[in-house]
Amino acid sequence: MAQDETKSRQRRMSAGAFVLGLVLLAPLAWVAYQGEADAARQRTLDRAFGNLDESLLFLRLGDEVAPPVNTWHADSEAGWINPVGDTWTEPPLTNLVQSVGTGTMVREYDFDGQWLAAGKWVGGAEILLTVVGREQQEADVAAARWRWVIIPVLLALIAAAITWYLAGRFRGPVQRAHDVNRDFIADAAHELRTPLSIIQASAGHALSRERGADEYRESLGEILTATERASSSVGELLEFARLEAGQAAPRLAPLRLDLLVEEVAASVRVDDTVIEAEASDAVVVSADYNLIRQVVDNLTRNAAARADKVSLSTSNAVSTAGAGLVANGLSTSGNESMARIDITDDGPGFDSGMIDHVFERFRRGDRAGAAGLGMAIARTIVDLHGGRCEAANREADGVDGGNGAIVTVYLPYK
């Protein structure tokens, strides 16, 4: 619904830009059209008066000047009208002669075509008349009319298209923010529903009748476990929302990854699971200590939840997947020099259908795994550092899975 409203707003903005463009461009287009139309009329008028000037020269100089066509020499008192040169039209000469007087005359008329008549008094009762065709003038005016109708419409359409594009670009971050908020609410409801149901059921069970101290203690223990799970889920949700909103810019400093994995291996304690860090040479990157430690801690705890043994190692290596790995979570170019952290376990491995989605929110890597945000948070932090995460199963006798999983973190040297 919100997305439809956003698109509707985008359409309204685009339509508004189109209308506004027309309103602003229409006066300019009218002025430009009038200018072109006046110029076309002036060209026709210049031709007519040019004919009159040539006729006057012909009358004064004789055959030294070629007479123009459709031109007449008249005497308004004597009543005679004679052609100066060749003529092929019959304008209303008497009316035109009477209209000239002792100045000039210009008149448009239509008779077997479109014409412009021009007259000029040359002295006494003598008058020169000429007619020229207006076909080219009318064609130029019509072309200007269409041109200055189409140009504003096209410019308004371009403005509408640009507005549509910009509104879409601006709509993207807004839509993503809306999606983050929507997903956050949905994820929070999903994660809190189970522990809240346990709390409600345990409290209701304890209060349904009088019970012994041991039963109350058991109910309180269930409530405590559920609240701890709810608190952990809320913390992960807030952390992921903070990362997604770009509020966790890494504070880069030199970081020894080999020492970091030793620290995590010594600090993480999971019942019945051995966590160890393999000895390695010094591996130094420029990274945020707290964020990268959170990455290694999350991935280690995720592996320990389904395995008896977890091994952590670091290396300076080209970022290609090693031999014996299948179904990478992300593709690699195979020629980038990056620092590498491997978290390997001896558990059941990732389900083949889920291995490409283990870094997504609330995705289980296997049927026994927990649905949470740990691996999604890890990938987001690594992305902030310009690195990437990969997940794969180790092969055992040619069979996918069965010999554990490996999660690899690549961090660039900066």
Image: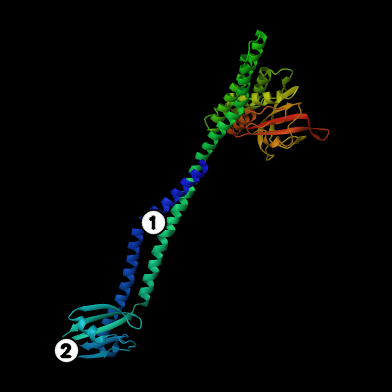
Q: Which quadrant does the C terminus fall into?
A: top right
Look at 32% across and 66% down and name the residue there: 34
Is residue 162 positioned above or below 275 on the image? Answer: below
* Relative image position of residue 194 (x, y in whole percent): 63, 25
**Which residue in the protein does label 2 denote?**
77
Q: Amino acid at mark 2?
A: Glu
Q: Residues within 10 Å of mark 2 (few under 14, many from 20)?
A: few
Q: Nearer the viewer, residue 203 or 196?
A: 203
Q: Quadrant of residue 228 in the image?
A: top right
Q: For the residues marked 2 and 1, what is the alpha-carbon distance in whole angstroms? A: 57 Å
* Relative image position of residue 22 (x, y in whole percent): 39, 56
Q: Quadrant of residue 202 in the image?
A: top right
Q: Amino acid at mark 1?
A: Leu
**Which residue in the protein does label 1 denote?**
22
Query: Regarding mark 1 in the picture, which secondary structure is present there?
Result: helix
Q: Quadrant of residue 306 in the image?
A: top right
Relative side of 298 to 11, left or right: right
The single residue placed furthest to the top in the displayed view is: 213
Query: Regarding mark 2 in the picture, which secondary structure is present there?
Result: loop
Relative side of 261 to 139, left or right: right
Q: Nearer the viewer, residue 132 or 160?
A: 160
Is residue 128 positioned above or below 246 on the image? Answer: below
Is residue 145 positioned above or below 211 on the image? Answer: below
Res 254 visible: no
The single residue placed furthest to the front in the displayed view is: 209
Foreground mark, 2 or 1, reads 1
